[in-house]
Image: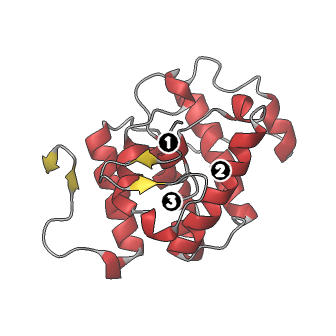
Amino acid sequence: MIENWIETSSGEKVQFLEPKPEQIKIKDIAHSLANQCRYNGHCHGFFSVAEHSVNVAMQLPDELKLTGLLHDASEAYLSDIPSPVKQFLPDYQIIETRLEEVIAQKFGLTYPYPTEVKLADIAALSTEANYLLKSQGDDWLIWEHFGGRPPINNKYKPQCLPPIYAYNVFLAYYYKLVPEERPSGIILESSAGVV
């Protein structure tokens, strides 16, 4: 039989079919999301889920910033599957929903995530596609579900940060939002060592 858990960068074994809040660690989330490229890697430059998550959080009011930062945290355990593919994977969606519930419980988030978070995610998608994809997202049907394509945010341009920087930016933003969890001393680190 194949295991029903995934081993994280910290060595935690997360049982993705029956996840528990104590298995979820912010550094594991940051590590994985920083190393995953959005758009299945088919974009101009390496653009991580971590960088995307910070952008979504920055668009939201203070009370929703943490939810925005962690809206894709389940992908740290399940991978970033493009939405056009994910819609044909109902079992994946069930597993993803359960993991999102546990992540929300762990970090004290409202679940299901508020509509504002989804709208910020879609707005980020519109801007990112404009800069990172050959089609610029111009012909995507997804916009119809949201009453049209959100305008491009000209104040934000994806930086395509290397994974170690995306990791540090993600964690620094998390500790800004949750200062009581911020470790003393140097906080910026990666599996490659302290930066």
Q: To which quarter of the image does residue 118 belong?
A: bottom right
Residue type highlighted by circle 3: Leu
Q: Nearer the viewer, residue 71 or 10?
A: 10
Residue at numbered disc 1: 3
Name the residue at 57% across, 23% down: 133
Name the residue at 55% across, 38% down: 80
* Residue 109 percent location from the top left of the image: 59, 73
Identify the image quadrant of the N terminus.
top right
Q: Nearer the viewer, mark 3 or mark 2?
A: 2
Judged from the image, the secondary structure of the residue bearing numbered disc 1 is loop
Left or right: residue 134 versus residue 164 is: right
Left or right: residue 89 versus residue 75 is: right
Name the residue at 82% across, 46% down: 146
Q: Residues within 10 Å of mark 3 (few under 14, many from 20)?
A: many
Q: Residues within 10 Å of mark 1 (few under 14, many from 20)?
A: few
Mark identifier at residue 96: 2
